[in-house]
Amino acid sequence: MARKLPSFDKSLSVKAATLADLGKIVRNQRAHLGLRIDDTAGFSAVGASVLSRLENGKPITTDKLLAILDSLGLLIAVLPKRKFIEVQPMLEADTDTQATA
C-alpha cells in the first residue's frame, strides 16, 4: 500500500515558536515538494523515525535538524521578535508566491 503524502497548506505561517510549529513547517515543505517521508529522510541522511519525530513536534539533535532543513531548501533565521513583526508580511507573501509557482 502506497503511503499518502501530506496535504500542502499554503496558509501555514513561517513562524516557528515551538517544536510543533517547526514540525508543521517541515511537513508542509515536504508536501509542497511531493516527497515521501522515507525519501526525505534518505536525502537528509537521517532515519525516517528522526524525521517523523521532528514533524510530530518532538526534539531531535541540532545537526539532524539542520540536515533536514537543508535537504528541503529551508533555513533557520533568528531575529528579535519586534523585527519579525516587521518582516512577517513580506515573508508570508513570498510563501504565497512560491506556492502558486
Image (cartoon, grey):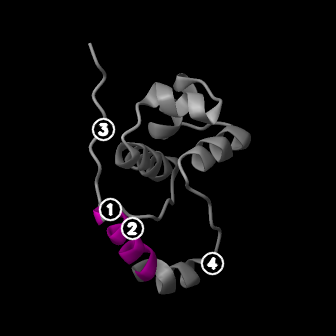
Q: Tell me the element at label 2.
A: helix
Q: Is residue 11 visible?
A: no
Q: Residues within 10 Å of mark 2 (few under 14, many from 20)?
A: some
Taking the view exactly as shown, the residue that stands out farthest to the bottom is 86
- For residue 61, side relative to residue 31 (left or right): right
Asked if marks 2 and 4 touch (Cβ < 8 Å), the reply is: no
Quarter of the image where one finds residue 79: bottom right
Disc nearer the start of the sequence (3/1): 3
> Along the line of sight, which residue is nearer the eye, 64 or 35?
35
Nearest the viewer among 44 and 23 is: 44
Tell me, for residue 6, which label it has, or none: 3
**What residue is rendered at 28% in x and 64% in y?**
100
Q: Amino acid at mark 4?
A: Pro
Is disc 4 in contact with disc 3, using a CB cutoff of under 8 Å? Answer: no
* 27 lies left or right of 46: left
The residue wearing badge 1 is 99
> What residue is shown with label 4?
80
Label 2, label 1: how far apart the Cα atoms are = 6 Å
